[in-house]
Amino acid sequence: MDIDFKKRIEIEALGRVIDGLDHYTVLKLKPGAPMPQVERAYAAQSKEFHPDRFFGVRDPKFMKQVTAIFKKVNEAYQVLHDPELKKLYDEKMGYRSAKGADPATSTGRHKRIGGSGGGSISKAALEAEKAAMDADEVVTDKRARKYWDLAQIAKMNEDWNGVVMNTQFALSYETENPVLKAELEKAKVKMNTKKKKNQNPYKIKIV
Amino acid sequence: MPYAIGIDLGTSNSVVTVLRDGQPIVIADEEGNRTHPSVVSFGHGQAVMVGHRAVRQMVFNPQGTVYSAKRLIGRAMESEEVRRAQDLVPYEIVEGPHRDPRIRVFDRVYALQEISAHVLRYLKQMAESYLGEPIEHAVVTVPAYFNDNQRQATRDAGRIAGLEILRIINEPTAAALAYGLGQAKDEYVAVYDLGGGTFDISVLHIMGDVFEVVSTAGDTYLGGDDFDAVLVDYLMKQLSPADQTAVRRSPAARLKFKRAAEIAKIDLSSNESTEIVIDDVLKDARGYEKAFHSSLNRIQFNQLVFPLVKRTFAVCDEALTAANLEPRDIAAVVLVGGMTRSQIIQEAVENYFGRSPEGGVNPDEVVSVGAGIQAENLMSRLRGEQGQSSSLLIDVTPQSLGVGMVGGFVERVIERNTALPCSEEKAFTTSVDDQTEVKIEVYQGESRMAVDNEKLGEFILHGLRPAARGEVKIKVAFDIDSNGIVDVGAEDMDTGQAASIRLEASTGMTEDEVQDLAFDNLDF
C-alpha cells in the first residue's frame, strides 16, 4: 500500500516530537479536558495512528514511527482514562480539570493495564528529535518549539483551529517572537474564511 | 479485487464468512450446512474427508477419523490436555520430534497443524467455489486463552492449507466486532463464549467503530464437551460393572454414549425432560446386542452441570476485576458458542449481569462473521484503500509475559490485557560471581512459578563483564507488535553486549517441515 504523501510528512514530523509531548497534546486535547472528550479523542487518534491503518506497508522505518506514535497515544490514554491517575497528572502539570465534569463519568471507567509503552524508543528516535531541533531556528524555547511543530502539522492538515491554538501555546512561551505572531494572524484569517465556508447554506463549492 | 475470508476454526465446528459489499455472508456447503464439523477422516489410500462427510465416518472408521484436534494443537506432549485426550479419543496420539503430540492414522503420522490445515483448506475451497475466484488470505480466530505456541501452530496450519493468515484474533473479540458492526454505539460489552472445549469472557469498550478490548479471561479446560462428559458419567453409573468395562474398552460404544449425552443436553434446552436410547450398545448374557435406556429431566441436568456453570462466573469475576468494572457497567452481553443455547446458561448469565443476553445474535456464526469483518478491514488496506471507512480493533495481550528467574520463579515484564502494540523493559542481574553468560527464558502465563507457565523460548547473552553476583545489570526488553509477534532482547548495560530472539513456536514444527507439508507442493 502506498501512503498518502501528506500523511507520511505528518507522521514523520509527529514522530520527531512525540516523546516530548504531554498526554493531552498527544490526544490533541486541551489540558484538563474531561473524560468523555478523552475517550472520543482516544478513538479518533487510534483511527489515525493504529498500525493496522497502515497494514501491509512495507517500510519498516515508517511503521516504526507509526507504532511509536500509537504507543504514546495508548500511554496517554492509560493515564487520562483513570480518574485517579488523571487527577494526579493534572495536579503535577498544573492543569485545572475542566469545570462541570459529570461525576458519573468518573465511575464505571476501566483502567488500562500495564505497559508504559514507547518510553524506551531507541537512539534513532533521540537522534531524529535532535535533528528536528537543529533544523528549526525560528523558535528557540524548547516548549514553544513543541507547539510550533504541532502547528506545522495542523497546517498540513489545513486544521486552522489547530494552527491557531498551537501557535498561541507557542507564543505563551515566546511572547515577542515576530514569526509566531505573523503566523498566528495568517492562521486566524484562514480560520475565519473556513468558518464562512462552513456557513454557506447552499453547499456550493467556493472556488 | 481479492477477497479475504474469516474463519472460526472451532473445536467441534468451523464456520467461514466473507464480506461482500460490506455484507457478511456465511458460506454454506453443497448440502446447505452453514457450520462444518472440524472433523477429518482418512480412508485407506489418499482419500481425505472433511466436515459432515467425515462425521459419517466416525462410527465406521473411528481410528481413522480425527476430531477435537484444536484441543491438542500447539501443546506439549507432557501437558495435562494431551494426557486427558489420550483417555478420551479413539485415535492414536504419539510423540513427535519436538515433544509435540502427533496423530497416527494407519501407517502415517500427522502433525496437528496438518489436521487443522485439512479443515482450513476445505473451508477455503468452499469459499472459492462460492466466490468463483481463488482465495489466499484469511483471518482465523482462536480462544482468547490460546498461548503463543497455539497461535503460531494455527498460523502454520493456515500456511500448510495455502492461506496467508493476515491476523489471528480472539473469538470473543470477533463476536463483539460482529455485534457492534455499523451501530455507532458507545458502551461496554461482555462476550460470554462457552464453546465445545473452552470458556472465554472478554470485555470490550465500543466507541463508534473503534473496538477496544479492555480485558479477557478464560478457562481452557471448560467447555460443552465437559458438560457431555458429566452426563456420560451419570449414564455409565447406571450400568453394571461388567457393562461399564465393556463400554470403556470400545471406542465405538464410548462415542455412542457421548453422542447420546450431547443429544440429551440439546433436547433439554427446549424440553423439560428427555428419553435416552442407545441402540445395540450393550450385550446381554447370551451375547446378543441390546439397547441402553434411561431418562433425564432438566432439574437433574441442572444439578449435574451446576459446578461447571459456576466456574464460568469465577472467570467473569476475574475479567471484570481486571477491567475495574462491575457487572452493572456492562450494557450488553453477547452469547457465543452452542453451549449458550442451554437454558441454565442463559438464566445464569441474566442473573449475574442483571440483564438478559442480546437476542438476534447467532451464537454459532457470530465469531466467523467478526473474523470476516476483520479480514476485510485488513484486506482493504492491502488493496491500497485508504480512509477511515472500516472499523478498528485495538487488541490486548491475552496472557502475561515474563522472564525465568533463579528458584523456578517468573518475573513478569508485560502484564496481560496490555494494549497492543506495546513494549516494556526491566533490569535483571547475575546470580553467581563471575558469571559470563546468562540464559534468558521467556514464559507466558499468570503463575509465579515457571513450571505452571508455557515456555515460549530461550536465548543466551554472552560476554558479560566478570563481577560479583548482582553487580552486572542486564536490561531485558519485550516488544509485541500489532500482529502479536513477540521480540525479546537483552543487553548488558555496562558492555553494551546484546542478544535477542523473535519468538516462534517452541513446540510443533520447523519452517522446513511447514514448507514440506504445504498442500500446494503435494498432490492429492
Image (cartoon, grey):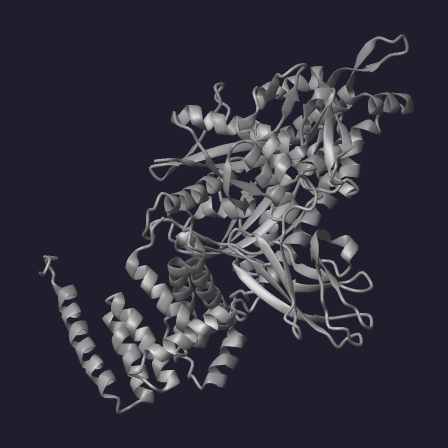
Report if residue B414 is visible in the image.
no
Observer-nearest residue: B456 or B390? B456
Q: Position of residue B523 (x, y in %)?
A: 56, 20
Comparing B149 with A201, the one in front is B149
Determine the image quadrant of residue A21: bottom left
Residue B271 vertical position relative to residue A44 in the rendered view, above or below: above
In the picture, residue A147 is in which quadrant? bottom left
Left or right: B32 in relation to B93: left
Identity of the residue drawn at 49% across and 65% down: A71
Q: Quadrant of the C terminus of chain B?
A: top right
Residue at image location 66% in from the left, 20% down from the top: B42
Residue B297 relative to residue B269: left or right: right
Q: Could you say where residue B223 lies in the image, as x and y percent from the top left?
A: 67, 40
- In this picture, residue A45 sits left or right of residue A112: left
B458 in relation to B255, above or below: below
Please provide percent x and percent y for residue B289. Answer: 81, 10
Q: Quadrant of the N terminus of chain B?
A: top left
Is B219 drawn above or below residue B416 in the view shown?
above
Can see residue A97? yes
Residue A37 pos. (x, y %) = 39, 69
Q: How many marks?
A: 0
